[in-house]
Image (tube, rainbow, N blue to C red):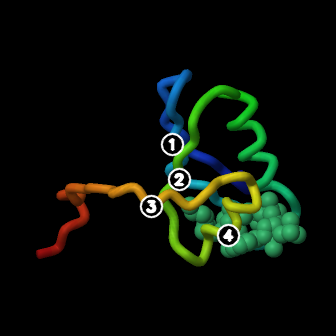
């Protein structure tokens, strides 16, 4: 496997990308773009969400995403808290 995208969707209104990954030696060959294209084709009417870092956000902006400044609330996963 050289790339993967993980999506959770209600198949209609809202789809969330959890991970988009391409092996370093295969990056910049259009694989990430193709994975996103297939997601959009699969649920063509859906709103799409992705949470990412500032560093990667321009990648998604190139693919049609817009930065959304809505309030985002979380409860951290207990499996990853080391306090
Ligand atoms: C981000 C990632 C998925 C992109 O996949 P890719 O197959 O390498 O990218 P593509 O070939 O589809 O796209 C290449 C284009 O994106 C741009 N790009 C690549 N990485 C970028 C980044 N980190 N930030 C902004 N733009 C980026 C390239 O400059 C290129 O631009 P161009 O189309 O104008 O020439 C891949 O670099 C990756 O797996 N990164 C590490 C994991 C990661 O950060 N995933 C996102 C988590 S939400």
Query: Tag 1's secondary structure?
Result: strand
In the rendered image, which residue does mark 2 sit on? Answer: 50
Label 4 lies in ligand 1 vicinity (Cβ under 8 Å) = yes
Q: Nearer the viewer, mark 3 or mark 2?
A: 3
Q: Earlier in the sequence, mark 2 or mark 4?
A: 2
Q: Earlier in the sequence, mark 1 or mark 2?
A: 1
Query: Tag 4's secondary structure?
Result: helix
Q: Nearer the viewer, mark 1 or mark 4?
A: 4
Q: Earlier in the sequence, mark 4 or mark 3?
A: 4
Question: Is 47 on the left or on the right of 63, as rendered?
Answer: left
Mark 3 neighbour class, 10 Å CA radius: few under 14, some 14 to 19, many 20 or more: few
Is there a contact, CB below 8 Å, between mark 3 and mark 2? no
Res 23 → quadrant = bottom right
Q: Earlier in the sequence, mark 1 or mark 4?
A: 1
Is there a contact, CB below 8 Å, between mark 4 and mark 3? no
Residue 75, horizontal then vertical, whole percent: 20, 56
In the rendered image, which residue does mark 3 sit on? Answer: 69
Label 2 lies in ligand 1 vicinity (Cβ under 8 Å) = yes
- Please state which of residues 81 and 13 is positioned toward the viewer in this rendering: 13
Residue 10's place in the image compared with 23, above or below, is above
Q: Which mark is residue 68?
A: none
In the rendered image, which residue does mark 1 sit on? Answer: 16
């Amino acid at each position: 496997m050289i790339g993967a995208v993980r999506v959770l969707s209600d198949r209609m209104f809202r789809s969330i990308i959890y991970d988009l990954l391409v092996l370093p030696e295969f990056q910049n060959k259009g694989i990430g773009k193709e994975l996103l294209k297939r997601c959009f084709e699969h649920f063509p009417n859906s709103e799409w969400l992705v949470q990412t870092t500032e560093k990667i956000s321009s990648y998604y902006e190139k693919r049609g995403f817009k930065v959304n400044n809505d309030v985002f609330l979380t409860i951290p996963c207990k499996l990853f808290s080391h306090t």
